[in-house]
Image (cartoon, rainbow, N blue to C red):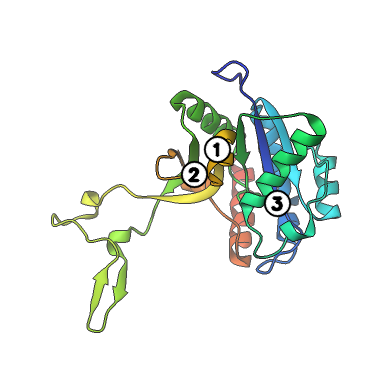
């Protein structure tokens, strides 16, 4: 899909390090016979956002999978950017710097696609990109509606409890304020804003709302089991 702003281009970044505590080699774990990383690669390429798609990893096996699926993986990420406590910001900065220094490529936006969100679609990515261009915003985050509302969350006190978010005086869940959860599937940031602030987003970010069925984030073995069940169910429905 063509950009609504002539000449805009993006660097779509899929960060996938080899190490993982909760699920060993999580980024190449299988969902329906496909590696987890493959879902994000396919969605990123099919979205046809103008620019480049980069897989940044420290792992040769993950890099080989990416290259087999025709995504760019032009470097192995330095070890110091691939630890359990390594932040996403330095990983993005490294990729931007590499493309500038080695390819002369300077994108207008960064699109971060975490590989742990397998059901985020090409359409989601394309719609989110078009939305940030339309709104001319510095940043966008993807969200989904919550099931368990904060008005029903409580924190213990010395005696009794207090609400995390005080419920409205008028009874009924339909009167709860609208609340969304940052699902981690899509972050889009103007490169100029990113370099100026060192942040992916702030409180002025545009919200791109996704369905809960598109928003699953793989963090535990139970999440992986559920993803396999969901994938099998979707295949039967086709």
> Residue at left 50%, top 50%?
183
Q: As displayed, is residue 154 above or below residue 82?
A: below
Does 120 sit left or right of 172 as displayed?
A: right
Q: As displayed, is residue 49 above or below residue 80?
A: above
Question: Which residue has dot 3 on it?
Answer: 36
Pointer 3 or 2: first along the chain:
3
Image spot of residue 197 (x, y percent): 53, 44
Q: In the rendered view of the protein, which quadrant contains the C terminus?
A: top right
Question: Which residue has dot 1 on it?
Answer: 189
Q: Tag 2: Cα neighbours inside 10 Å, few (<14), some, or many (≥20)?
A: some
Does 213 sit left or right of 14 as displayed?
A: left
Q: Tag 3: Cα neighbours inside 10 Å, few (<14), some, or many (≥20)?
A: many
Question: Which residue has dot 2 on it?
Answer: 201
Image spot of residue 230 (x, y percent): 58, 52
User: Which residue is farthest left?
Assistant: 170
Does 199 sit left or right of 31 as displayed?
A: left
């Amino acid at each position: 899909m063509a950009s609504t702003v002539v000449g805009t281009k993006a660097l779509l970044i899929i960060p996938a390090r080899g190490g993982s505590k909760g699920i060993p080699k999580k980024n190449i774990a299988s969902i329906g016979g496909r590696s987890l990383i493959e879902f994000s690669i396919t969605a990123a390429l099919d979205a046809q956002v103008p620019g480049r798609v980069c897989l940044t990893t420290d792992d040769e096996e993950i890099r080989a999978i990416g290259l087999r699926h025709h995504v760019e993986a032009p470097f192995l990420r330095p070890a110091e950017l691939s630890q359990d406590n390594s932040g996403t910001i330095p990983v993005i900065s490294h990729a931007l710097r590499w493309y500038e220094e080695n390819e002369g490529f300077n994108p207008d936006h960064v699109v971060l696609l975490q590989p742990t969100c397998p059901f985020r679609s090409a359409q989601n990515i394309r719609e989110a990109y078009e939305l940030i261009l339309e709104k001319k915003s510095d940043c966008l985050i993807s969200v989904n509606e919550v099931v368990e509302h904060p008005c029903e969350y409580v924190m213990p006190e010395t005696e009794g409890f207090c609400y995390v978010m005080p419920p409205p005086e008028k009874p009924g869940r339909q009167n709860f304020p609208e609340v969304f959860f940052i699902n981690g599937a899509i972050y889009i940031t103007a490169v100029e804003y990113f370099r100026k602030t060192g942040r992916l987003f702030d409180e002025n970010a545009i919200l791109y709302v996704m369905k809960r069925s598109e928003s699953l984030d793989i963090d535990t073995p139970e999440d992986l089991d559920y993803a396999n069940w969901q994938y099998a169910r979707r295949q039967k429905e086709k």
